[in-house]
Amino acid sequence: MVKLNENYFNLKESYLFSTTARKIREYAAANPLKPVIRMGIGDVTIPLSKTVADAIARAGAGMATKEGFHGYGDEQGEGFLQEAIRAYYLSNAGVELNKNEIFVSDGAKSDVANFTDLFSNDNVIVIPDPVYPVYLDSNMMLGRKITLIDGNEENGFLPLPYEGLEGDIVYLCSPNNPTGAVYDREGLEKWVDFANEKGMLILFDAAYEAFVSDSSLPHSIFEIEGAKKCAVEFCSLSKTAGFTGTRCGYTVVPEDIVIGGRSLNKMWLRRQTTKYNGTSYVIQKGAEAVFSPEGMAECRKNIAYYKENARIMADTLTKMGIWFTGGVNSPYIWLKCGMDSWEFFDMLLNEIQVAGTPGSGFGKCGEGYFRLTAFNTHENTREAMSRFEKLLAGK
Ligand code: MLT
C-alpha cells in the first residue's frame, strides 16, 4: 500500500499565487468588460532585452549546426556563465568568488526548495513572518520544526536575531518579498555574527538585489565579513532581466562552509549532479548576455521603468497618509490596509478591478497588510492608483 507524505496535509490547500490567480481568472471570466489591472504576482511585463534575445536566438540557431550543437552540459553550469556571474559579483558587490562556488540553475525558487535536501529533518528552521511562501511550505513538506520570527511595523518588517532565539537554519530575503524592506549592513552583520556564534546557517534570497539603488545597502550577504562561513545565497535573473518565463538563476555555496567536517559545496554538487542535468545551454547563452555591458544597461533601463511605477505608488500612498514599506529599493510595496487582507483583495478586485496580494497569504503578521507590485505599465499603475485613491477616499 502506497504511503503518502502526510506532511502535505498540513499545507494550505493551494499555493498562494495559485489561489489569487484563480480568483482573478474567475472575476475576469464573469466580467469580460472590466479588465483587471494586475499588480499581484511579481511577474515582469517588459520583453527581454534585445541583446539577450539575440544571444538566445543565435544559440538556438547554432543548435541546428554541427559546430553550435550542445548535448548535456556541466550540471554546475557552463564555465562562460559562471565566469560572467563571478565578474558581476565583483563589480556589483565587491565580492570575490571562486567559479566552483557558483551553481547555475533554472531559478531561485527551485534551488531554495531543493536545498532543503541537504539537511536532516531534525533541524529547527527559523523563518521570518511574513515571508515568501516557498521557505515555509518546502520545510513543512518535510515535517520540520519551524520557529517564526515576527516582522512588524516596530521592526520595519526586518526582524533581527535576539537573545534566546534557537534554531539551526534561518531564511532571510533582502530586498524582502513581500514587504520590500531592505536590511542595511548593520542588520545583516547582526545576523551573520549571530549565525557564526551559534553555528547557524543563513539561506539568503537575493532575488531582488538588482533593485537596490541606495549605495549604502548591500546587494549580497557576502559583502558582510564572516558571511562566507555561514551563508548560502540564491539569486535569479527573473526580476533582474525579465527571465520569469525564460528561467535561469544561480546559487552561491561558499567553499568555506564546513558542517560536521563536511563541505556543503561538495554536498550540493553531489545533489545537483544526481538530480539535475543542468540549465538549457541556449538559455545560459542568454544569461551570459545579461551580464554583458549592453545587456546589463538594457536590463537596468527596464528596472528603472519598474521603479518609476513604485515611485508612483509610493507618492499616492504618502499623499493619502497610508503606512507602507518598500518601493524605493524593491519592486514591492507593502501597505497597511487596516482590514482583513483577503477582504481588501476582494474589494479592490470587485470595485476597482485592481489585483494585488493579501498580506495574510504571507503569514499571520501579514494580516492587515497588502502587497502591490511595480511590474505593470506606467499607464496602468497611474490608473490603478487613481482608482485606489477614489475608492478609499469614498470609504
Ligand atoms: C512573487 O510574486 O512573490 C514572486 O513572483 C514569486 C516568485 O518569484 O516565485
Image (cartoon, rainbow, N blue to C red):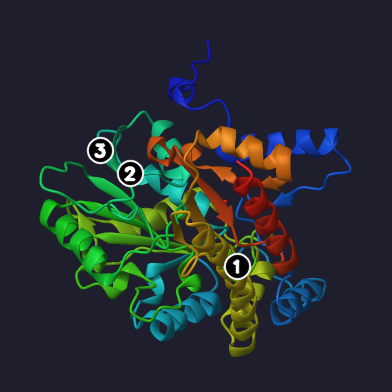
* Amino acid under disc 2: Ile
Q: Which mark is residue 123?
A: 3
Q: What secondary structure is found at the residue carrying circle 3?
A: loop
Q: In screen coordinates, is 296 left or right of 245?
A: left
Asked if ligand 1 lies within 8 A of label 1, the reply is: no
Q: At x 32% / y 47%, what residue is drawn?
A: 151
Looking at the image, residue 95 lies above or below residue 379: below
Q: At x 11% / y 42%, what residue is drawn?
A: 164
Q: In screen coordinates, is 18 left or right of 152?
A: right
User: Is mark 2 in CB contact (under 8 Å) with mark 1?
Assistant: no
Looking at the picture, how far across and down is residue 176, in whole percent?
42, 57
Looking at the picture, how far across and down is residue 50, in whole percent?
74, 80
Looking at the picture, how far across and down is residue 301, in whole percent?
63, 81
Mark closer to the chain start, 3 or 1: 3
* Distance from the alpha carbon under mark 3 to that under mark 1: 43 Å
Q: In screen coordinates, is 350 left or right of 73?
A: right
- Circle 1 packing at 10 Å, graded few (<14), some (14-19), many (20+), is some
**Which sits in the foreground, 68 or 315?**
315
Q: Which residue is mark 2?
A: 127
Q: At x 72% / y 79%, what residue is drawn?
A: 55
